[in-house]
Image (spheres, grey):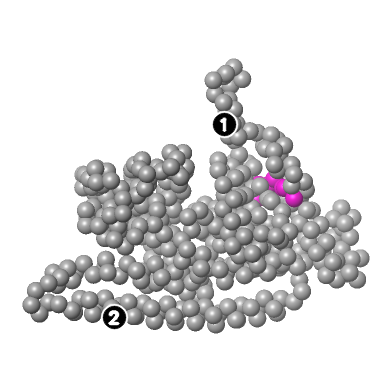
Amino acid sequence: MLEKKDIALERAVLIGVVTKDQDEDKSKEYLDELEFLTFTAGGYAVKRFTQRMDMPNPKTFMGTGKIEEIKKYIDENDIGTAIFDDELSSAQERNISKILNCKVLDRTNLILDIFAQRAQTSYARTQVELAQCEYLLPRLRGMWTHLERQKGGIGMRGPGETEIETDRRIVRDKIALLKERIKTIDKQMSVQRGNRGAMVRVALVGYTNVGKSTLMNVISKSEVFAENKLFATLDTTVRKVVIKNLPFLLSDTVGFIRKLPTQLVESFKSTLDEVREADLLLHIVDISHPNFEEHIDSVNKILGEIKSSDKPTIMVFNKIDSYSAEPLDEDDLETERTKSHYSLDEWKQTWMSKLGNNALFISALNKENLEDFKKRVYEEVRQIHITRFPYNHFLYPDYDENQA
């Protein structure tokens, strides 16, 4: 099921809806993210289609007229793939495929494909394969298009349905097998975590593509794979880090994203054990992203789901070198001044000021303010360490006193 191969750049159209819960701005933002996902998967977004509607059409997701418009564009421009921003039901996927006569993917399928490309270790590949099987199971009927001629007629009843049922049983058995395999690996990883002793554990968490792996490389002097694409890191990486003379374990975890498929949340919960067992979380935020506040909410929501929202957390606002406020002329009396016009100093005076010294502003790529970052992490890890081992406090003096 998992194929690791380079895919030629595919031409695709992106399709989304504008609803009462998702206005035009939010729809555009989701499609921007979908375009980045498409690029990460090996595709190129040629055009976007959106439609305003109260709720998606249960048969074809979009309205009849819009589907015809999309079909015409696909036929005229030799487009091979149509990607929908929301998860399609098996019936919708089947109906749309018949009309458009091209490959139809939804956001979930696209993310699963990226995960399949990115999974390196046996554990990550097993988790992705489990998510793929769970996604595939209710959609098997739509994949038996070669049996459509067997819908009726003497001697034609039965075999197709039997084959589908056989395949369903195979997929169910595969899911059970993968779940058992994950349980076994979980036990092994639990033993590994236990063998790390009582060292303080720090976990990097955050939205996908905020620079967690880049920061990991800078701090730990290691070579964790980092790239300006979504989900560059799937496998949790743990490194021993020493700041001054204070050692601790730093783990780099899979990034979060909005509309994350439920199958992936379930299958990757075990990967997030590193977060659950961490003593300190470093919540990395890409402050240069126009919607970084929503990203923070998305991450906090998932941290709540895995019961890790009450852990000591330092907010690290990364990519300050890329941050730029939208220009606003002082003489412009018509344009309303919004958060998009805030400078970094103005942002620091907002709700961020309530975080006190738990808000850090850095650039991992350009190594800006890294000394402040190291000092704050050192202080927090030192406090956790001497709470755990009171007799060790003399080993680790204050950061400024420690010249080692």
Would you name the residue on which mark 1 appears? 326
Vertical side of 373 occupied by 3: above or below: below
Q: Residues within 10 Å of mark 1 (few under 14, many from 20)?
A: few
Q: Residue at x 37, y 48 (%)?
A: 55
Tell me the tag on residue 404: none
Would you name the residue on which mark 2 appears? 166
Q: Looking at the picture, how far across and down is residue 286, in whole percent?
A: 60, 47
CB of mark 2 within 8 Å of CB of mark 1? no
Residue 11 visible in the snapshot: no
Is 146 part of what is drawn in magenta? no
Work out whether residue 308 or residue 317 is closer to the camera in this orientation and state it.
308
Q: Quadrant of residue 383?
A: bottom right
Q: Tell me which amino acid carries mark 2.
A: Thr
Work out whether residue 186 or residue 165 is closer to the camera in this orientation and state it.
165
Q: Which quarter of the image is occupied by the N terminus? A: bottom left
Image-based side of 73 in relation to 25, left or right: left
Q: Looking at the picture, how far across and down is residue 355, in whole percent?
A: 74, 47
Task: Tell me where the magenta segment starts and ends, as one range.
Answer: 358-365
Q: Quadrant of residue 186?
A: bottom right
Vertical side of 132 occupied by 204: above or below: above
Label 2, label 1: how many angstroms apart (C-alpha)?
58 Å
Q: Residue at x 59, y 17 (%)?
A: 331
SS under mark 1: loop
Q: Which quarter of the image is occupied by the C terminus? A: bottom right
Image-based side of 117 in relation to 319, left or right: left
SS under mark 2: helix
Q: Nearer the viewer, mark 2 or mark 1?
A: 2
Q: Tell me which amino acid carries mark 1.
A: Glu
Image-based side of 319 in relation to 76, left or right: right
Q: Looking at the picture, how far across and down is residue 83, in whole percent?
A: 35, 52
